[in-house]
Every structure is written in structure tokens, then in C-alpha cells.
Image (cartoon, rainbow, N blue to C red):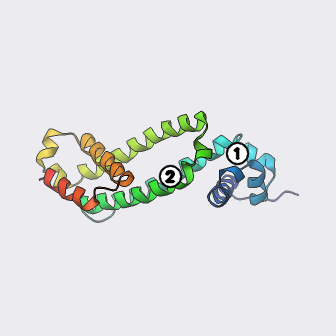
């Protein structure tokens, strides 16, 4: 008699992440996932017909968790600068882990992963810009600034995101200096 699993999809994703994070991409295969989950191999294929779909879903889940963190920052107490610094720090942690796990050569060697990843990256960067745009629009520093009259909130949010990513990837410029510049721009 087969056992009933409350949420097999989440179990599969959870065990797959453990395998990927602890043993690497080469150890991630449907048989190892089925063994780790203690479920039939066919059940794995019912939820994820290919390894690519499984990996892409894990990557999407990684992004979703990041956006939940951003949502809590967006709704937290604190001014614009407090929220932006929190977002910067979370983005820094996110990118570091993303590079360690998702940008390994064995994962990025195939064009199908690269194409799917780039499509998702564009969507997620747009979402990050939208979140920062919402934070800007609800803050008096920004809404009363001269810069707000010359540039749209989307342009400023895009500028912030591009600079966040640049500062994380090439740490020659400290966040504190960026914040000083932003405060000067938003006067």
C-alpha cells in the first residue's frame, strides 16, 4: 500500500535543493531525488518531467523567497534609506548564493538553461525595479524632491538597481557613499 504524502511537490523541491546544495548538480538526478524523498521515481516525473524543469522550478522558488523578503522590507517601518539599505544587503546575499549555486559551469553549460535563465532574470529584475519604485513613490524624501520632477520613479528605481548590482559585483564603491549621493540627488 502506498503512503500518502501531504505535499509531494514541495518535498521533491526541498530534497532536490538539498542534493544540489550539498552534493552538486552532477548528483542531482531523478533517481537520487526519488530515493531522498522515499517516493516512486514515477511520482517525480509526474511533477517534473525533465531535470531542466526541476532545476528551473528550484531557481524560481529561490527568487520567490527573495521577493517575500523584499515584501517584508517594503512594508516595514523605516524611511526610504533604511529600506534601500536592507534591500541592498539582501540582494548582496542573494547574488552571492546565486553565484555559488546557480551559476556553476555544469549548470550553465547548456543553451537551454542560459536562455530560460535570461528570460527569468529580466522578469525578476523588472519586479525588483517595481518594488523599489513603489518604495520611492510612498516616501516623502522622493516625492518632494527636485529629481522626482525631472525623472520618473521607474528611471530612478532602475538607476538604483543597476548601481546596487554594480556595487555588489565590483565592490569598489561602498554602499554608504551611494546613499550619500542618493540623498544629495533627492534634495
Where disc 1 sits, the SS reads helix
Residue sitting farthest toward the front: 172
Tell me which numbered mark, 2 or 1, is placed earlier along the sequence: 1
Q: Residue at x 40, y 43 (%)?
A: 125
Name the residue at 49% across, 40% down: 120
Residue at the disc numbered 2: 99
Q: Nearer the viewer, residue 6 or 21?
A: 21
- Looking at the picture, how far across and down is residue 64, in whole percent? 50, 51
* Residue at the extreme right: 1
Q: Quadrant of residue 115?
A: top right
**In the rendered view, does 59 fall on the left or right side of 37?**
left
Q: Residue at x 36, y 52 (%)?
A: 170
Residue bearing mark 1: 47
| Residue at the limit of the structure toward the bottom, as seen here | 77
Q: Nearer the viewer, mark 2 or mark 1?
A: 2
126 vs 178: above or below: above
Determine the secondary structure under disc 2.
helix
The residue lying toward the viewer, choosing from 46 and 88, is: 88
Give the percent coordinates (x, y) of residue 34: 77, 54
Q: Residue at x 64, y 41 (%)?
A: 53
Q: Give residue 176's position: percent from left, percent from top.
A: 25, 62
Check disc 2: other Cα within 10 Å, few if <14, some if 14-19, many if 20+.
few
Location of residue 183 by image quarter: bottom left
Q: Is residue 126 in view from this perspective?
A: yes
- Tell me how many marks there are: 2
As drawn, the label of residue 100 is none
Amino acid at each position: 500500500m502506498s503512503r500518502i504524502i501531504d505535499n509531494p511537490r514541495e518535498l521533491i523541491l526541498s530534497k532536490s535543493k538539498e542534493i544540489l546544495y550539498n552534493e552538486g548538480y552532477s548528483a542531482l538526478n531523478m533517481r537520487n531525488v526519488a530515493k531522498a524523498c522515499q517516493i516512486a521515481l514515477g511520482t517525480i516525473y509526474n511533477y517534473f518531467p525533465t531535470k531542466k524543469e526541476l532545476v528551473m522550478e528550484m531557481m524560481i522558488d529561490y527568487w520567490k523567497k527573495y521577493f517575500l523578503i523584499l515584501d517584508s522590507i517594503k512594508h516595514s517601518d523605516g524611511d526610504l534609506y533604511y529600506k534601500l539599505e536592507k534591500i541592498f544587503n539582501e540582494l548582496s546575499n542573494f547574488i552571492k548564493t546565486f553565484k555559488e549555486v546557480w551559476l556553476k559551469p555544469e549548470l550553465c553549460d547548456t543553451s537551454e538553461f542560459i536562455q530560460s535563465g535570461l528570460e527569468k532574470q529580466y522578469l525578476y529584475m523588472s519586479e525588483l525595479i517595481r518594488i523599489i519604485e513603489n518604495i520611492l513613490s510612498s516616501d516623502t524624501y522622493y516625492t518632494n524632491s527636485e529629481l522626482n520632477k525631472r525623472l520618473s520613479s521607474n528611471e530612478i528605481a532602475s538607476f538604483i538597481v543597476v548601481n546596487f548590482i554594480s556595487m555588489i559585483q565590483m565592490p569598489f564603491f561602498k554602499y554608504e557613499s551611494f546613499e550619500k549621493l542618493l540623498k544629495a540627488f533627492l534634495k
